[in-house]
Image (spheres, rainbow, N blue to C red):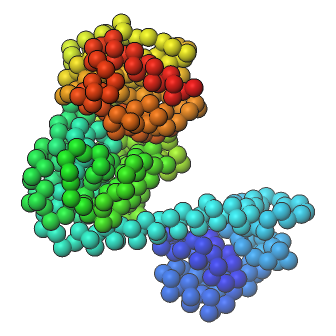
Amino acid sequence: MFVCADEFLARLVPPSRASSRGAMYIVETPGARARVARRGGRAVAGRLTSPAVYRRVMGGHESVLVAVSRERRSAVVAAIRAVAPAAPILLIVEEEEPGPALPGVSTMPLTAFTERVVEPELERALTRARVDRVRAHFAGAERVLIMMQDDPDPDAIASALALRAVLGRTKAGTPLATFGTITRPENRAMTRILEIEVERIQPRALGAYDRIAMVDVQPSFFEERLPEVDLVIDHHPEETPVRARIKDIRPGYGATSTILTEYLRAAEVKVTQRLATALLYGIKADTLALERGAVKADMDAFAFLHPHANHSALRRIERPELSSEALDIFALGISRRHVVNGVVFSHVGPVGYLELVPQFADFLLQLEGVEWSVVSGVVNGELHISLRNVGYVRDAGEVVRQAFGDLGSAGGHRSMAKAVVKLRDWRSRVGECTAEAVRAAIVSRISRALR
């Protein structure tokens, strides 16, 4: 129940958001009642200090939000208590008001109420406007392609699935695609268990689509030269200007899945159990279960998705079979580990798929007494270097750019980053590519960057 002389509370808490809880607005004049009704709310008009007004609508257990002038508060609270002695009452007050609070009444400053209630509603409205713009741009397209990175991770796969739901499109007309393949066991398990189809396509196939969207990746991340795309939604830093008609890039977020969850909620799209499971896993994977780089938005999305997800399926995804190759790489990497001033290094040499490198970097960060892990491996003629840190030290993206930015692509977030250097460039500008030479050069460059 919202008690205020005019429709002020109906503006702060719109009926569209409060009606699911059977909300009632108590106002003082017929004009205010009519204005609330035009907003879609239920309202009763009468003198706010009269118990008879509350007797008409209260059953005795409603919670009551009151926003009235300071001079009338005691009388209004007394009228409510005469009808419902045990009803919880929250009183909106000005900042730093002196004097004791009314007995049994909770208070909240208007600024705090605005921060907790109004600002989220404003953000929701802005997100809905962004969704409307995206939908309008894709509305006339017969065929739409949703692109991910070359070896899509759970965040990318979940975000692509969510974007298709936001657009209201079918699997046949809007495939989820990559130029590469899905290699990591957990990611393959995710697509199999949740029945998510990801197509492998060639760059020349892009011309067959009317619109192209990218999630969890940017055009500059691809070796192939790509045309301007229609949409980019990503949480990675914008290393070079993104060539897209619409872009939503939020490097402060822990996962792209969080952005897409906000889209779904703002547009009031039904989130199926399969989609909730995928998005929840996307957030968990990119933030290490909210322990790495997570912000309030990630936590809010996680809390929303958690009750809707299939946790049995999640457990099956998170504990896939470990291949013999992965086990051999881990064993080799452990034997080659080398700790220098709180940084553990390991060069594992050639690996079958690149996800083994960041996976092992995550694993090595558990080593006692280290604050950084740096793991490198060679995949398809490229040297991949993954950095991880414990989160309260220097920015990993800054360190990797300083160490390897002159050789290839390098960047990332505060606690996780990577560099990719072609072996031919490494030979011409650094030197030999033997395991020992590469390890020594990486140790030297990282150590200088951390000084």
- The residue located at (52%, 46%) in the rendering is 295
Residue closest to the far front: 428
> Residue 98: x, y in percent?
89, 63
- The answer to whether 253 is drawn above or below residue 96 in the figure is above
- Furthest-right residue in this view: 99
In what quadrant of the picture does the N terminus appear? bottom right
- The residue shown at (68%, 75%) is 3
Res. 20 in view: no
Q: Nearer the viewer, residue 420 or 86?
A: 420
In the rendered view, does 127 fall on the left or right side of 330?
Answer: right
Check the image and name the residue furthest to the bottom.
31
Q: Quadrant of residue 417?
A: top left
The answer to whether residue 123 is left or right of residue 177 is right
- For the question of whether residue 178 can be seen, the reply is yes
On the image, the x and y values in percent for residue 360 come to 35, 21
Against 70, is 378 above or below?
A: above
**Residue at 45% in and 49% down:** 251
Residue 116 in the figure: left or right of residue 250: right
Q: Nearer the viewer, residue 28 or 300?
A: 300
Please tell me whether residue 107 is drawn above or below residue 374 in the rendered image.
below
**Where is residue 415 shown, x and y percent of the image?**
49, 34
Left or right of residue 184, residue 102 in this image:
right
Residue located 13% across and 56% down the image: 206
Rendered-image quadrant of the C terminus? top right
Residue 150: x %, y % from top left: 22, 40
